[in-house]
């Protein structure tokens, strides 16, 4: 989930906080496994656009999202949509796999799929909709709602549902981690530990839960060594806190982890947070809320279509608040794979 300290290439930190990036052997090519053990993904097949009627909507809702928030706002959301749409139905998810089925059925019926829940549900539904060639709309119903935040969607779900009538369709990128699609940011390392704590914390919400989880995780954290391969570069070691691959800017309830990420540029923002002392981390941590953490000399930021990563101990890769992959992990981007309804550009 987070880290505020980063190293721009060519910059040096103090003697005690020098980031470590160590070259290792070149990975094999020709479709073989990389040095981390992950196999590069093949190009995604082209998907024909499905015919969709913008006035017919299926709400796919996770009633448990946001500690039950999605269920509480469902009636208001449905009423707001019904004021302008001809046909609004509601489908309640029983699992992520069930969400896939509901999304596919909506696309097959020529309907817009409306995800009402957290970022995890939105990412899962996005994958199913993209594979079927359908159209997705997102309404904020979880704790973080970070992808919706980056799109400029109103934070109030009923207001967002009302505004959806003016939304425009846009082609956006869809990343995958070991084949599992997500929308926002995939990361591991310290972020993995933070996310475990955040997901177990039910008495806080939004930024508060993630800030609390960061402080809790910090006490037990010890630096990790990651092996990273970015596009066709040689694998290298990265010692520190976090490795992230961002399609969008926000995670953690409003933390601007990748301020320059663009959901439609065909690239991922790769963020490597290098080793620092805990006091340095705490002093710089507040910068992440504005995105200014990328200005400090502990982060490398680059853009790529593919990241392969492994580590010296087990971590799960988290994306959109959910565990999506074990290590070794390959994270790739599928340019323009998703048809998404977004607010009109000002």
Image (tube, rainbow, N blue to C red):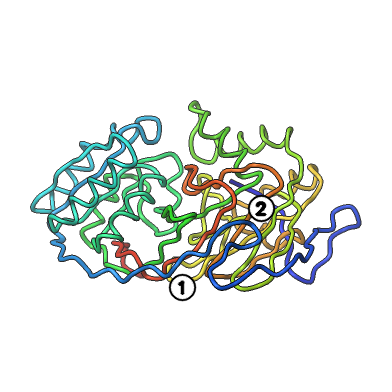
**In the structure shown, which secondary structural element does the residue marked by tag 1 occupy?**
loop
Label 1 crowd bin: few (<14), some (14–19), many (20+), radius 10 Å: few
In this view, the residue farthest toward the right is 15
Mark 2 or mark 1, whichever is nearer to me? 1
Q: Is residue 15 left or right of residue 55?
A: right
Q: Are marks 2 and 1 in contact (CB under 8 Å)?
A: no
- Determine which quarter of the picture holds residue 270: bottom right
Residue under the image location 80 percent in, 59 percent down: 20
| Camera-side residue of 82 and 133 | 133
Residue under the image location 27 percent in, 67 percent down: 169
Q: Is residue 127 left or right of residue 58?
A: right
Name the disc covering residue 121, or none.
none
The residue that mark 2 highlights is 287
Q: Which quadrant is home to the C terminus?
A: bottom left
Residue under the image location 71 percent in, 47 percent down: 312
Label 2 crowd bin: few (<14), some (14–19), many (20+), radius 10 Å: some
**In the structure shown, which secondary structural element does the residue marked by tag 2 occupy?**
helix
| Camera-side residue of 345 and 48 | 48
| Camera-side residue of 81 and 64 | 64
| Camera-side residue of 296 and 329 | 329
| Image location of residue 14, percent across then percent down | 88, 58
Residue under the image location 64 percent in, 53 percent down: 310
| Image location of residue 98, percent across then percent down | 27, 40
The residue that mark 1 highlights is 265
**Is residue 260 in view?**
no
The correct choice, above or below, for 255 with respect to 48 in the image is: above
In this view, the residue farthest toward the top is 203
Q: Earlier in the sequence, mark 2 or mark 1?
A: 1
Alpha carbons under labels 2 and 1: distance apart: 25 Å
């Amino acid at each position: 989930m987070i880290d505020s300290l980063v190293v721009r290439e060519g910059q040096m930190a103090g003697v005690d906080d020098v980031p470590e990036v160590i070259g290792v052997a070149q990975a094999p090519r020709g479709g073989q496994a990389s040095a981390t053990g992950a196999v590069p993904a093949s190009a995604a097949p082209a998907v024909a656009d499905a015919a969709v009627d913008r006035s017919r909507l299926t709400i796919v809702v996770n009633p448990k999202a946001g500690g039950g928030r999605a269920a509480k706002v469902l009636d208001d959301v449905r009423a707001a949509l019904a004021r302008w749409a001809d046909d609004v139905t509601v489908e309640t998810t029983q699992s992520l796999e069930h969400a896939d089925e509901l999304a596919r059925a909506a696309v097959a019926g020529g309907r817009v799929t409306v995800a009402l829940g957290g970022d995890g549900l939105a990412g899962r539904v996005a994958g199913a909709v993209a594979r079927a060639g359908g159209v997705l709309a997102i309404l904020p119903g979880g704790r973080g709602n970070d992808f919706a935040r980056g799109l400029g969607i109103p934070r109030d779900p009923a207001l967002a549902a009302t505004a959806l009538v003016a939304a425009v369709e846009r082609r956006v990128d869809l990343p995958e981690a070991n084949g599992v699609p997500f929308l926002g940011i995939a990361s591991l390392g310290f972020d993995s530990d933070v996310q475990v704590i955040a997901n177990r914390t039910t008495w806080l919400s939004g930024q508060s839960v993630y800030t609390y989880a960061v402080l809790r995780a910090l006490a037990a954290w010890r630096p990790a060594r990651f092996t990273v391969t970015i596009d066709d570069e040689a694998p290298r070691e990265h010692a520190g806190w976090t490795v992230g691959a961002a399609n969008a800017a926000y995670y953690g309830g409003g933390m601007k982890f990748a301020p320059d990420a663009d959901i439609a540029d065909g690239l991922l923002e790769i963020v490597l947070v290098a080793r620092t002392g805990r006091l340095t981390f705490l002093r710089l941590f507040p910068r992440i809320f504005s995105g200014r953490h990328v200005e400090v000399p502990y982060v490398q930021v680059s853009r790529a279509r593919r990241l392969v990563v492994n580590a010296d101990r087990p971590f799960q890769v988290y994306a959109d608040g959910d565990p999506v992959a074990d290590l070794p992990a390959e994270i790739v981007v599928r340019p323009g794979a998703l048809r998404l309804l977004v607010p009109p550009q000002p």
